[in-house]
Amino acid sequence: GQQLNQSPQSMFIQEGEDVSMNCTSSSIFNTWLWYKQDPGEGPVLLIALYKAGELTSNGRLTAQFGITRKDSFLNISASIPSDVGIYFCAGRNTGNQFYFGTGTSLTVIP
Amino acid sequence: DSGVTQTPKHLITATGQRVTLRCSPRSGDLSVYWYQQSLDQGLQFLIQYYNGEERAKGNILERFSAQQFPDLHSELNLSSLELGDSALYFCASGGRVGTEAFFGQGTRLTVV
């Protein structure tokens, strides 16, 4: 099945630094979603984007729906230890099918 | 709480056995998606049901099958289990226009 290209695969950053990750696809999506997964838990929805060019924030998180509808990025500002986890992007196509990225593992060093 | 309920939370079984995982979607959601997540792996899409009918199929083995019942809950059946089937199995629900996919807490399957 289709998977989205998500990068970077992992990140090790100092507490307080900003983080940026992105997701690209060969197909157009109508919706881009960003999830965070803690160990042993299910992914939790962070941000949903519905229109090309849309920029949406949720606290220290900001995500954008790429103008080509084939990419999206997620920024985390002023990282804190509880930001640790795996971040997944997901795209939803016109057929209501979801495809997930391979994940970005984030480690925040206090 | 996402509103998606998965049972059981943990399952330990022997090779060759068959198990059934259950998922109750959020109220009003018609779609159920099943995903497999092996250790240190991403989410592998298995299958999607929409209002009782199979909508899309991913990398699902022939030993695995699923169905969605009239009350919209879904079951994932895994048979002739192998050690490599040990993984977290997630279901997500969604599908209404403009809504997102919400995940359950997952079922951790261990095949010994």
Image: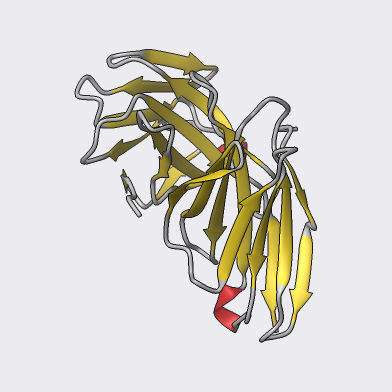
Left or right: where A78 falls relative to A64:
right
Residue B105 higher or lower than B8, as above or below: above
Quadrant housing residue A93: top left
- Decide which of A19, A2 is in the foreground and name it: A2
Total numbered labels placed on residues in the image:
0
Residue B11 in the image: above or below residue A80: below
Q: Position of residue A23 (x, y in %)?
A: 31, 38
Question: Can the viewer see residue A109?
Answer: no
- Of A32 and A29, which appears nearest the observer? A29
Q: Nearer the viewer, residue A44 or B46?
A: B46
Q: Residue at x 70, y 84 (%)?
A: B112
Which quadrant of the figure contains the C terminus of chain A?
Answer: top right
Query: What residue do we see at 64% from left, 29% from top?
Result: B29
Residue at horizontal 34 percent and vertical 15 percent from the top: A51
Residue A30 as seen in the image, left or right of residue B75: left
User: Looking at the picture, how far across and down is residue B73, in whole percent?
Assistant: 72, 43
| Vertical order, A60 against B17 (above or below) | above
Q: Check the image and tell me how it is coloured.
A: secondary structure
Q: Is residue A79 above or below residue B68?
A: above
Q: Which is more toward the observer, B2 or B74?
A: B74
**Could you tell me residue A24's position as x and y percent?**
26, 39
Q: Is residue A17 rendered to the left or right of residue B3?
A: left
On the picture, is B35 further left or further right than A6? right
Q: Does residue B54 appear in the picture of this structure?
A: yes
Quadrant of the rendering where the N terminus of chain A is positioned: bottom left
Where's residue B75, x and y in %? 69, 55
